[in-house]
Image (cartoon, rainbow, N blue to C red):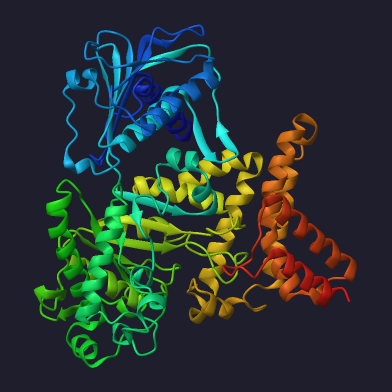
Amino acid sequence: MKKRYNTVLTLLLVFLMILTSSFQMACSNKETAKNVNPNHKVIITDTDKFLIKNNKTSYSILIPEQYDKVIEKAVNEINYFAEQSSGVSFSVVIDDGTKTADQNYISIGNTSIAQESKIVITQDYGYDGYRIKTFKNSIVLLGASDKGNLYAAVDFTERTFDTATYAVDEIKITKSDSVKLKEFDIKEIPDFKSRVLLFYDYSMNEVLRDRIKVSHNKEGWIYWSHSHFLIINPDVYKEAHPDWFSSDGTQLCLTNEGMIQEFIKNVKQVVADNPNTRYIMLGQQDRNTFCNCPECSKQVAKYRESGVQIQFVNKVAKAVDEWLAQTDPQRELLYVMYAYQKTVSAPVTFNESTKQYEIIDETVRCRDNVAVLYAPLYASYTHNLFDEKNNNLASVSLRGWKAVMNGKNLFVRLYSAQYGFYFMPFNNWSTLQDNYNLLREAGTDYIIDNGSNDTVAANMQELKGWVSGKLMWNAELNQDDLIKEFAENYYRDASQQIIDFIDLIRLHWQELPKEVFALIPSNSQGIKYFTADIWTYGLLKQMQKLFDQAIESIAHYETQDHELYLKLKHRIDKERLTPIYFELELHSARFTKEEIEQKINFFEQICYQSNISEWAEIDTLTISSLVSNWRLKLLK
C-alpha cells in the first residue's frame, strides 16, 4: 500500500511538473501580463523582429523639433547602452511632421509618431510618469514632462538591453550582437510625484539620479530649507525693525504686518529672479523657538505655532499669486512651509466620537498651492511612523497633517543615518517599506530620504540608497528581493554575508531593552546609544566573522580576476569600518597595542580610499582628527 501510494505521489508530482513547465513555456514570451497596481502596468512580449541584428540596425531615434538638454540625455542614455551592448549607435532624426510609425523609429517625446499613436498622458501622471508602447513598427516613449521622457528612455533601455545601474561604479552591461524588438505596453506613474535621495553619491552624480529616477534636493527650488532669514536678513533689517524678530532674535515675528509686507516684496523679487522653479521654501530658522510677542502668543494659544505659520504663508502666497496673475499668468508655484520643531504638530483637534483629527477652523487650511514639509526629526525608525505606541509624536503629527492637507501637498523628509555617529548602524531596515507605503496612502506627494549627504559613509549607504530609490517609485516592490538583487550584483559571491549582516543589525535592535529600542537620528540623542552595553564585544566579533567569511567567499577572484577581487574586497572592507570603529572607541582594552595600531592604520587607509572625510554631520569631526586622537590616546 505504501509503495503504491509513493508511486501515485511520484506520478502526480511529474504531472504537476509537466503542467507547470507547459504553463511557463506558454507564458515565457510575456514578461508581465497583469499588475495589481494600475499605476505600474508592465506588459512586454517578445516578437520575431529585431531592433539590432548582427551589430546593425534599421532603427533611428526620433525627437521633437523643439527639444532641450533632457531629451538629449534620453538619446544619450539609449545610445550609450546600445553601443556598450552591441556596438550600435542609433542615428538621431529631428521630427519634421512627416514621420510615421510604419517607419522604424524609437520616438522620444511629443513627436508626430506619438501623436499618431493617440497615447494620452493625463494629469494623473504627475511630473515624471510615462508610457512606453510599441506602435506599428515604432516604439513610443512619452512622458508627462521631459523628465518623464528621460525616465521612459531609462526604462526602455534597461528592459531592451538587459542593463541596470546599481551604483556609480557598478553598472550591469549585457553583450549581444542581436537584440529582439519587444512588444511594449508600459504605464508607469510613480507612487510619489517627486522623490529625493539625500545620499552622497546621489547628491553628487546626476546620471545615477536619473537612472534610479530621483531628483536633487535643490532641483526646482527657490531656497530649499530654512529660508526666513534669507528673505528678511537680520543684518539688514534688525537694527531698524527689532519688532520684526522674536525677542531672542532667532525667528521672525509672523504676525507683524510691516515684516509681512517686506517679506512679500522680497519674495516677489526672488520669484522673478528664478523663473524656472517649481517650489519656494518659506521655512523658519533651524531652531526650536517661536516668537512670543503678545500677538503671536495670542494666536499660538488658539491655533498652535503651526497654525500661525500657515496663516502667514497663506497671506504671502495670496499676495504673490495676485502679482503673478498680472506679471506671469502661466507660472505655477508651490509655497512650502516646514512642519519642524515648534511647528511639527498640525492645527487640529481630535474628535472622540469619530476618532478622527479635525482642523481647528478654515483659517488654518492651507491654500491649494501651499505645501507642508513634515520632518519627523525625533521619530523612532525601528518602528513605522504611524505606530501610535512607539512613535506617538510622529503618528499624531502625520494624521493631523493629513487632515489639514486633504490628501495633497504633503511633503515628508525621512532620515536614514545616525548624524552624530555615521559609523553607527541605523535601524530602519525593518520599517523602510512600511513607511513608504503608509506615507503613500496618506497622500504624500514629495518624499525626501536623508542619508549621509555630506560625505561617503559606511553602513551600506549604496545599498540602502538604491533600495530606497526603487521603493520611492513603486512602494509595492519586495524590499527583500531588492536587497538580494543589489547584494548579488554589488558584492557578488559575498552577497549572503552582507544580507546576514543586515539581518544581524535588525535582530540586534529587536533584542535590546525597550528604552533603547528606538534610534533617534540626531547628534544630541545619538550618544545614548554609544555604549559598550549596546555595541558589545560579542556582537562586534559576529560582525567581524561575517566580513571574514565575505572575504573568503571572493578569494577565488584573486587569481581569476584580480581587479574584480580588489573592488569587491574594498567594498567589504568599507563595511568592516563599523565594527572597527566600535572596537577602538569602546573595547580597546581587549587588544594589544600592535592590534590597535593595525586597526587604526586599516581604518585610516579604507576611509582615505573611500573618500570618507567625516564621522558625523559636523565639519570639524573629521576622520583625520578621529585617527589622530586614537593614536594619541590608545598608542601612547
Residue 8 visible here: no
Is residue 627 found left or right of 332 in the rendered image?
right
Identify the residue at image location x=48%, y=20%: 82
Residue with the most extreme bottom position: 294
In the rendered view of the protein, which quadrant contains the N terminus? top left
Is residue 384 found left or right of 54 in the rendered image?
left
The answer to which of 19 and 88 lies nearer the viewer is 88
| Residue 261, above or below 148 | below
The answer to which of 88 and 262 lies nearer the viewer is 262
Q: Estimate the x, y position of residue 304 in percent, counting from the top left.
A: 23, 83
Identify the residue at image location x=27%, y=43%: 127
Q: Quadrant of residue 7?
A: top left
Total labels: the figure holds 0
In the rendered view of the protein, which quadrant contains the C terminus? bottom right
Q: Estimate the x, y position of residue 620 in percent, counting from the top left.
A: 64, 70
Q: Estimate the x, y position of residue 367 in percent, counting from the top left.
A: 15, 64
The answer to which of 404 and 399 lies nearer the viewer is 404
Q: Quadrant of residue 227?
A: bottom left
| Residue 539, above or below 207 | below
The answer to which of 283 and 466 lies nearer the viewer is 283
Q: Estimate the x, y position of residue 285 in percent, counting from the top left.
A: 38, 75
Residue with the most extreme front position: 240
| Residue 176, above or below 586 | above
| Residue 210, above or below 375 | above
Residue 56 visible here: yes
Identify the residue at image location x=22%, y=22%: 114
